[in-house]
Image: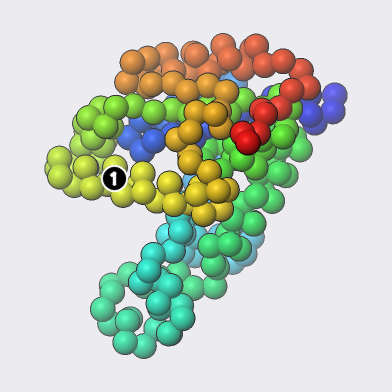
Amino acid sequence: MSTSDTLMLTIAHQYGSGGSLIARDLGDRLRWSVWDKEFVHKIATEYQLAETAVEAKDERVASFIERLVELLGMGGFATAYTVLPPRGLDDAQLVRITRTIVEDIAQEGRAIIVGRGGNHILAKRPRTLHVFIFAPLEARVRRVIQMEKLTRSEAERRVAGMDRLRTDYVRTFYHADWRDPTHYHLTVDSAVWGESGTADLILSALEHIPHGRAREQSP
């Protein structure tokens, strides 16, 4: 069987929609590898970087302050921040490394790529299902309050901030709107279907993927 005949799944998700947990559930059911924070561990290990440094740049574009520090050096800024911006790995390098890892994983198939522009990287790969999981804002805020033990205002800021980071990341490196449904085969409201029901829908869609057909690129 050629690698193009093996199934793959990419999942993009709004923060607070339960996408990461749904991906884990699917990985357990399918016995497939799940690549989410695993990207951080692999990159940190292979490039001898601190995982905290990789995670600080994972799926985000450097902030204005980070760019100033990189341009002007640490002096003057270092005392103002308790957590220093990561050095030694810029955004474009991290995206190139991530793309290479995703393409290598796709050679074997039977894996789930969570976020990281996976649907764009593998847009031309046949037998790959691209899914977007979303939920209404209020449902996402309630979930973040419950899961992360935050106040409502903290949860609202967290959700808005993560949406902004993911929007900037995909727009910067893939020139696309990550919430545009034309970039996916299936979009699911997890607030309606629940985590288990959403996973069921995705499994059903996987069973019906036609052979030898990739997602058509939007004009």
Dividing the picture into quadrants, the one containing residue 152 is: top left
Q: Picture coordinates of residue 161 (x, y %)?
A: 31, 49
Dividing the picture into quadrants, the one containing residue 3 is: top right
Q: Is residue 24 left or right of residue 211?
A: left
Mark 1 packing: few (<14 Cα in 10 Å), some, or many (20+)? some
Q: Picture coordinates of residue 43 (x, y %)?
A: 59, 57
Q: Picture coordinates of residue 179 (x, y %)?
A: 45, 35
Name which residue type carries label 1. Ala
Q: Which residue is mark 1?
A: 160
Q: Nearer the viewer, residue 110 or 211?
A: 211
Query: At 15% across and 45% down in the image, what residue appears?
Result: 153
Q: Quadrant of the N terminus?
A: top right
Q: How many marks?
A: 1
Q: Nearer the viewer, residue 45 or 218?
A: 218
One can see residue 110 in this view: no
Dividing the picture into quadrants, the one containing residue 29 is: top right
One can see residue 13 in this view: yes
